[in-house]
Amino acid sequence: EDMQIILIYNGNNTFPMKEKPKCSNATITYLESSAIKGAGHARNVGLKEVKGRYILFLDADDYFTPGAFDYFDKYIYENNDIVFFTSTSIRLKTGKISTRHLEHVRKIDDFLSNGNDELLRYRWEGPVCKMFRTDYIKENNFQFEVDSYDLLMKRC
């Protein structure tokens, strides 16, 4: 009930699904974006509609695991600009665990062990495995690159 889901379809046809996800009382907004402009443009379209306190980005091939929102809820009333978290990755064809996520795990482990936040601050590209405070995004006018599929955020 305290969640807003913004689904942005950036394909060439009409929105493939407009049904509410099972077990959800969330508010859902359906938007469309140009496929030519890539994921960054789609995320920028969504940023204009955000009403919640925090933002999480998820691509069509990403999933939240059971218990993910219990983790997010631990931070929802704090005033962190960004909360980093680890993930698990699988190979879509086989369903077996992949190694894609291990780079994120290594960066978080380094911070927790050594207090070194350089890898988190300067070497973590894209919005994956981050929960952003909405006001932080809006106050700093963060936008995503739109001229390519590059997921790096830039300050405008």
Image (cartoon, rainbow, N blue to C red):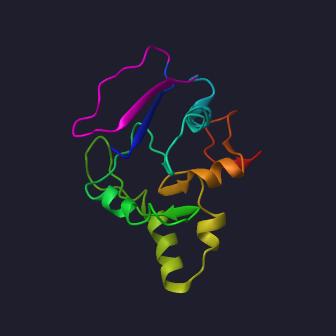
Image: 82 above or below 126: below
Residue 74: which quarter of the image?
Answer: bottom left
Residue reaching furthest right? 156
Residue range (magenta):
12-33
Please tell me which residue is depicted at 33% across the width and 56% down the height of the picture. 69
Q: Nearer the viewer, residue 56 or 98?
A: 56
Please tell me which residue is depicted at 22% across the width and 40% down the height of the picture. 23
Relative side of 85 to 125, left or right: left
Please tell me which residue is depicted at 29% across the width and 25% down the height of the picture. 19
Relative side of 13 to 132, left or right: left
Q: Nearer the viewer, residue 122 or 29?
A: 29
Q: Nearer the viewer, residue 64 or 26?
A: 26
Residue 59 location, x and y as percent? 45, 40
Residue reaching furthest top? 13
Relative side of 105 to 147, left or right: left
Q: Quadrant of the N terminus?
A: top left
